[in-house]
Amino acid sequence: MQLQDFAYDIPPDRVAQMPLAERAASRLLMLDGHDGVCRDGMIRDLSELLMPGDLLVFNDTRVVAARLMGYKASGGRVEILLERALEANQALVQLKGGKSLREKLSITTVGGDVRLVERCGDLWRVELPAAVLDFFEEWGEVPLPPYIRRSANPHDRERYQSIFAREKGAVAAPTASLHFDSNLMAALEKRGIERAFITLHVGAGTFQPVRAANLDEVVLHAERLEVSAATCEAIHGARQAGGRVVAVGTTVVRALESAYLATPDCTTDQPLAPHKGETRLFIRPGFPFRVTDALITNFHVSESTLLMLVCAFAGREHTLAAYAHAIKAGYRFFSYGDAMFVTPQARVGR
C-alpha cells in the first residue's frame, strides 16, 4: 500500500480548536469493522455499549510542558520540542526554525542555556541547565499539535491531560482518554467494566508527517513503554471470563501488541507477559492483532500512521467511509475532537 491510500479531505471547521466544557460530552461514532455499519452516539453510551467483564486499558502517561522557545547568539529564533529525557540533564529534542545549527552551540532560553551536544538523525542530543522534566515543566508550554491554530493557554495544562495521567514523559496526550471523567468512570464501574493501565510515552515524532510514499520505507521514532504484570493478569482474567480487551487509544494498542511480540514464543496462545522497553512498531493493514478486541480512538490526520492503525483494525474501506460519514455529520476532529468505538474487521487472533 502507498501513503496516498490513506488520504482524505477535511474542511478546516471540522478541526476542534478547543476542548468541550465537559469531557464526557463528546460524540461517539460506533464502527462495526465486520460489516462497516456506523451508528451515531455519545461517549456516555459506553456504559451501555460495553459489557460486564470487559476491560478498558488506559495509557497513564503524563504530558510534559515540552515546547520551549530559545534564541541563538545571532538572534535567530529556535523552537525546542522535547522528545525524551536522557541521563545527566541531557535530552533528545527536535529543533525547528534554526539554520546552521552545530555541536557545542548554545541556545538561550528563559530557563538558561541549552547546549547542543550532537545530532542524532533528525533529533539533537542537548544538555540542559537542570533536570530535564523539571526544566521543561517550569519553563515550557503545553505542546499543542500543529492543527490547533492557537497558542497554548493555562487551561490546556489541565485539559490536554487525562484524569489518569501520572507517569511524566509524553509530549502529546493519549487523546482518546481525554473523554473520560469521574462520572463516566463511576457509571462504567457500576456496569462491571474493569480497568487497567499501560504506560507509553508519546514522542514528538507523533507530530511529524509520513515522508515516504512507500510504506515499506517508513521507520517510526522509538517510544518508551511498560506493560505491568498487574495489567497482564487483568487481561488474562478478562479473557478467561469471556470479556473483551478494549484499548483506549492507539498508544494502548501499540503497547499491548508490542508486548505480545516481545513475549517469548509469541506464536502460541500463552498469556501476555510483562514488558518494558522501546517500540517502533508500525501497525498497518495486514497486521495480525493478538491482544486488542475493540478500540476507542479519536479521529486522526490524513495519511498518518495512527489512521493506518485504525484501518488495519477495522479495514481501510470501512474506516475511510466512517470518516466521510463523520465529516458530513459534523463530528469534531483530532485531539480535542470526538471519538470512535471500533470493533475489528474479523475476529482478533489470540
Image (cartoon, rainbow, N blue to C red):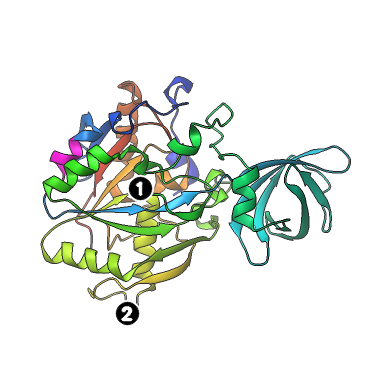
Label 2 Cα neighbours within 10 Å, binned few <14 / some 14-19 / many ≥20: few
Residue 149 is tagged as none
**Residue segment shown in magenta:** 45-51
Identify which residue is drawn at 44% across, 62% down.
Answer: 225
Observer-nearest residue: 142 or 76?
142
Residue 265 is tagged as 2
Observer-nearest residue: 230 or 251?
230
SS for tag 1? loop
Q: For the residues carrying marks 2 and 1, which lies nearer the camera in this image?
A: 1
**Numbered-mark total:** 2
Which residue is label 1 attached to? 249
Answer whether residue 247 is magenta in the image: no
Identify which residue is drawn at 56% across, 50% down.
Answer: 205
Q: Where is residue 71 in the image (x, y as percent from the top left)?
A: 80, 41
Sooner in the amino-acid sequence: mark 2 or mark 1: 1
Q: Where is residue 54 in the image (x, y as percent from the top left)?
A: 17, 53
Observer-nearest residue: 110 or 41?
110
Amino acid of disc 1: Gly
Q: Position of residue 160 (x, y in %)?
A: 46, 38
Answer whether residue 50 is magenta in the image: yes
SS for tag 2? loop
Observer-nearest residue: 78 or 230?
230
Horizontally, residue 101 falls left or right of residue 86, namely right
